[in-house]
Image (spheres, rainbow, N blue to C red):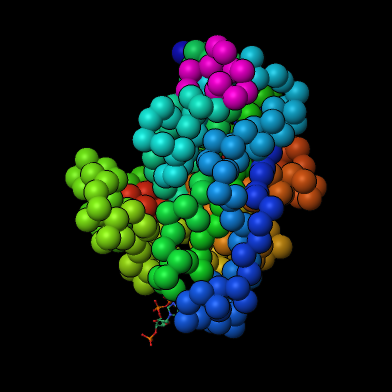
Amino acid sequence: MSLIPVGVLGTGKYVPDRILTNKELESMVETNDEWIVTRTGIRERRIAADNQATSDLCYEAALKALDSAGITADQLDLIIVATITPDMAFPSTACILQEKLGAKKAAAFDLSAACSGFVYGLANATNFISTGMYKYALVIGADSLSKITDYTDRNTCILFGDGAGAVVIGQVPEGRGFQSFELGADGTGGPLLKIEGGGSRNPASHTSVDQRLHYIYMAGAEVFKFAVRIMGNAADEALRKAGWDKSDIDLLVPHQANTRIIQSSLNRLELSEDKCMINIDKYGNMSAASIPVALAEAVEQGRLQEGDRVVLVGFGGGLTWGASAIVW
Ligand code: UT7
């Protein structure tokens, strides 16, 4: 069976209006702007309003992606929302979004792969389209990390922000679109980055709340070491599967967790900074939203021309990783 070439038809992003600066964090925990900027590259991040849930962020990003793809919601066959901050345990955020958009014929589900979720989602949706089962899919990476961040924990609260990035994918001309995917997981690293409370192991209770189990726990230094190793490995593997060399890359769109992690990926891939999307200074780490928001900004800024060779690469809780090579 010959596969249909699949690529990105439209992109969109949404970030909440409220900006939380490093200066404000100085009054919340024992930290300072200089430490945050030098250790992470982050200057500010966006925070969802009390009445904004992840599906609300998805909705705004989705409208833009549909508009930029030139299709309407009722043409969608599939909606995948990659998130670790769903509106609720169920129904899925994808189903909530399907209703908001009026995407009546779309199948819809959420995908849990933390910061790698968007690349996992793209790979899933691509397989549905390349086999001819579906024509158009909406893939969103969205997270409202502020809702699960402990603002008394300086190890984590300085890092995270909220946002959503969306793409519509579908058939593209031969030679364009997704050339390879590299997905992976190492469950032995699960305890390094987690939320223990609220699931079937530790259902929500007064005790779980008192123990702050509903907030993100992260062993930062261990995750950092994993990230530095896996970002390079995953990107290399995506390049190998696509038959590309490092020097073929026109734009790298990495997960935005820490500028030092991004810098180590650039060194490993022998790329200069002008070949990389970096927006962590404005948004911090938005988990599944980081890569698609950076991709949408690359398009907004005119940094992607037809035929450009793009590599997406990310890592996250699970532990998981994902990379993809795309001819734009
Ligand atoms: O999306 C995937 C999820 N997460 C990540 O990718 C995060 C990966 N990890 C990181 O980015 C880094 O490990 C951090 C930014 C979280 C931490 O940076 P680090 O260079 O690994 O610092 P550290 O944890 O080794 O801490 C160094 C020092 C410690 O003080 P002592 O023990 O040396 O006195 C910390 O207590 O920095 C201290 N520290 C802070 N100081 C000021 C930790 N957090 C802060 C803070 N402000 N916010």
Instruction: Work out whether 90 lies above or below 106.
Output: below
Image spot of residue 169 (x, y percent): 61, 27
Q: In which quarter of the image is residue 52?
A: top right
Question: Residue placed at 47% from the left, 52% from the top?
Answer: 147
Instruction: Work out whether 144 lies above or below 94.
Output: below
Question: Farthest right residue?
Answer: 302
Q: In which quarter of the image is residue 59?
A: top right
How many discs mark residues in the rendered view? 0
Q: Is residue 196 visible?
A: no
The answer to whether residue 10 is left or right of residue 95 is right
**Ligand 1 location (quadrant):** bottom left
Q: Quadrant of residue 282?
A: bottom right
Question: Residue placed at 45% from the left, 66% from the top?
Answer: 151
Q: Which of 85 and 108 is in front in this view?
A: 85
Image spot of residue 216 (x, y percent): 37, 58
* Chain part drawn in magenta: 98-108
Question: Residue placed at 66% from the left, 57% from the top?
Answer: 18
